[in-house]
Image (cartoon, rainbow, N blue to C red):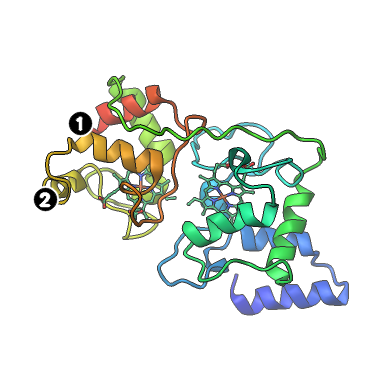
Amino acid sequence: MRWGLLAAGLLAVGCGGPTTAADFGEELFQDARLSESEFNSFSCATCHGTSATPEPGHVRAGYSLYNSAFRPSWWGGYETNLLSAVNFCYVNFMRGVSPLTPEDPKSRALYEYLVSISPDTEAPALPFTVVKNIEDVPRGNASRGAEVYRTACQTCHGETHTGKGRLTELASILPEVVEDYDALFPGVPHQLVVIEKVRHGQFFGVGGSMPPYSREALSDEDLGALLAFLGL
Ligand code: HEC
Ligand code: HEC
């Protein structure tokens, strides 16, 4: 859908037409152009499902946003305001130039959409455990790792070795990219750089728009299987 049509949808909200704010919010949720940055290829839906039950075939860095609107806190207690929780993603992962304001019709529509998929107004906050110290993990089963790659990484990075089908050219080709690490991170074993990236989304605090994977999003066991698949 083009921005012109989105604007028309918004007008329909104002006129009490058939398109509700929640419908408009759902469109925004699925559209990478919510962020004005030319470098952004992610929509909210890239990293968050919206179903009540686990989605087969998808391991996402973010939780399903079903029942998310009324949680008492977000991001494992770091955020106590829903718009701030959303803006963390909008600014850091979607390269939004400035945070969405409460008055912005887009944040209101996103809010209405999140409310529309949150029937439980007493839903509890969810845990978000960041792995602090980056340490190697035991290698697991490579065929399990292939499945982890397909369900967790492939949407953004495309196929291994070629990047075929990747969402953005900014997402490096795995595992070949580790060949650059000897110069970039001399003395640091390749697998530790990859673990750092997956667990923190950044390289030792610097740059990038890849999301971090908490322990809840990806277990060490699955990470070990993934490393085995990648030959690291
Ligand atoms: C590149 C991936 C990515 C994108 C894009 C993204 N998020 Fe997130 N989001 C995350 C991660 C990772 C977390 C932390 C884990 C969690 O709490 O779900 C998170 C957390 C959240 C939370 C807090 C959930 C909770 O209960 O802790 C909300 C709400 C949220 N995001 C909404 C959004 C919305 C709305 C958008 C689009 C404007 C968006 N996110 C875009 C990755 C992303
Ligand atoms: C939401 C999209 C997305 C997902 C999902 C994702 N990545 Fe990334 N990843 C990126 C982007 C974009 C970059 C390049 C920008 C940056 O460094 O953040 C990147 C960079 C990387 C890098 C650093 C490459 C370099 O340039 O040195 C590694 C390693 C990596 N990803 C591994 C993974 C693995 C393993 C998974 C699955 C567990 C994964 N990524 C899932 C988007 C993603």
Q: Residue at x 31, y 36 (%)?
A: 195
Of 9 and 35, nearer the camera is 35
Rendered image quadrant of residue 98: bottom right
Q: Relative to 58, is 231 on the left or the right?
A: left
**Label 1 crowd (10 A; few <14 / some 14-19 / many >=20):** few
Q: CA distance from mark 2 to mark 1?
A: 20 Å
Q: Position of residue 143 (x, y in %)?
A: 32, 24
Q: Residue at x 55, y 35 (%)?
A: 128
Of 25 and 88, nearer the camera is 88
Of 163 and 44, nearer the camera is 44
Residue 149 showing in the rendered view = yes
Nearer-N-terminus badge (2/1): 2
Q: Residue at x 72, y 78 (%)?
A: 8
Please name the amino acid that badge 2 sits on.
Ala
Rendered position, 97 above or below 150 = below
Q: Position of residue 73 (x, y in %)?
A: 68, 42
Rendered position, 106 above or below 220 = below
Q: Which residue is most to the right? A: 16
Secondary structure beneath disc 1? Answer: loop
Q: Is mark 2 within 8 Å of ligand 2?
A: no
Q: Position of residue 5 (x, y in %)?
A: 66, 76
Q: Relative to 116, is 33 on the left or the right?
A: left
Please name the amino acid that badge 1 sits on.
Gly
**Label 2 crowd (10 A; few <14 / some 14-19 / many >=20):** few
Q: Is mark 1 within 8 Å of ligand 2?
A: no
Rendered position, 180 above or below 196 = below
Label 2 or label 1, whichever lies nearer to me, is: 2
Q: Give me the disc on residue 183.
A: 2
Q: Give me the disc on residue 231.
A: 1
